[in-house]
Image (tube, coloured by chain):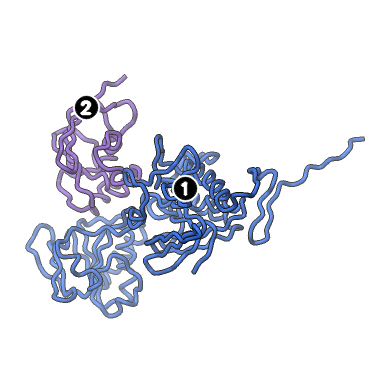
Amino acid sequence: MINTDILIIGAGPTGLFTVFEAGLLKLRCHLIDALPQAGGQCSEIYPKKPIYDIPAYPEILAGDLTDKLMEQIKQFEPGFTLGERAETIEKQEDETFIVTTNKGTKHHAKIVAIAGGLGSFEPRKPPIPNIANFEDKGVEYIIRDPEFYSNKKVVISGGGDSALDWAIFLTDVAASVTLIHRRNEFRGALDSVDKVQELKDAGKITMITPAEVKGIVGIDKVEGVAVVQNGGEEFILKTDHFIPLFGLSPKLGPIANWGLEIEKNAIKVNNALDYQTNIPGIYAIGDVNTYPGKLKLILCGFHEATLMCQSAYKRIFPDKKYVMKYTTVGGVDGFDGTRKEAPKAVVKKIE
Amino acid sequence: MNPDITLKITDREGILHEIQAPTDMAMNLMEIIRSYELAEEGTIGVCGGMAMCASCHCYINSNHDLPPKTDEEDAMLSETFNIQNNSRLGCQIQLKPSLNGLKINIAAEV
């Protein structure tokens, strides 16, 4: 069991900044995210896009914003459960919470802050009628362990970076790799495209373009895929695995069943006070929440995180007196023993 | 000031909406759909309008002169499901006076 003060669901910019504001109040944080890395949409969808409305940054790349936030919270030693999705929540008799992920990891926390953005990123599944029957029976939307494909025949479908990168990687592992895409053009880093061209010329990757997988054949498991190339006759291509890689799309997912008030795919909160949900002790901040006048902006998420942490502190320590302290005055004391503070002014007489 | 234009938008349930759209606020088709809440929040404009998610996929059903597809839009559409010849990403179509009367269907959520 992982123990913490504030369990943050979602490691996007709002979730990461929460660690800082909580740290100033000497509260420890742990973050859960379905993605394998921190940063949320900023690292998953648009790391190379510039953002222009982060205060004091005339321009900053989304990926760099993530790196800066990670640097800013480092001394507060946040814990991370990455690549797992928060699945269930149980309120305990002492008003604390246990949150369990889809992989069974349990987290015990006094406060839960949902900073889940638009939800957890789920693979986009192509509309092939019988595809659901073959999930985990030869159809995989995410490659977890490349060795799983050792000496197997693999068909990958998709035209972006992940399709290209995995096609390249699996040529060293799988018995054969076929890449199927609707067009001859691929959208990916230039060197990945060049590498696939090279492997195709060397006979290590079979390309079928412009083409689409229309069906899956097999009895208990995938034995082949039905392919239509360039509007021609459908043909069957024998394979052990079919891996559609069409990117990820966010879904609110299991959080929708936690008994929280949901409106327009977002969690209703009390914005007059502290961004608490209808369940005391559970807060929702950033893009995942809604209230009159809500704007889904990173800078609004930062503000919400700040107020939420003050409220969380009062909930944990109802009888302690506290007033907010400026970092210019109090400095920053890390849990790792480091201290940041303003240099002392020199007071000296001029003769 | 540019005049408002009329758009005929069929939502994902098949209901036709005739709406007025401003042409002087640098809005695109995805944004006007969101402003009228013709598709559920969180299911459209997920990437914010960067041609990176295709949640604003729509079908154009009138003969208006549209801006040509950029390479980015074309590539994103090639990875989108249920594509037709008249598929476009709403976020890449800026609203301007010449689009008065534009007819579109919002594509199903995938």
Q: Nearer the viewer, residue B64 or A252?
A: A252
| Amino acid type of the residue that numbered disc 2 sits on in the rendered structure | Ser
- Disc 2 is placed on an element classified as helix
Chain that appears purple: B
Q: Kindly identify which residue carries mark 2.
A: B98
Rendered residue at 64%/61% (across/down) = A336
Q: Kindly identify which residue carries mark 1.
A: A61
Residue A177 placement: quadrant: bottom left
Question: Please, is residue B20 above or below residue A10 in the view?
Answer: above
| Amino acid type of the residue that numbered disc 1 sits on in the rendered structure | Leu
Question: Please, is residue A273 above or below residue A67 in the view?
Answer: above
Q: Can residue A250 be seen here?
A: no
User: What's the chain of the residue with tag 1?
Assistant: A
Specify the farthest residue to the bottom.
Answer: A151
Residue B49 placement: quadrant: top left
Rendered residue at 41%/65% (across/down) = A100
- Residue B21 place in picture, x, y as percent: 26, 28
Q: Is residue B34 left or right of residue A33?
A: left
Crowding around mark 1 (Cα neighbors within 10 Å: few <14, some 14 to 19, many 20+) is some
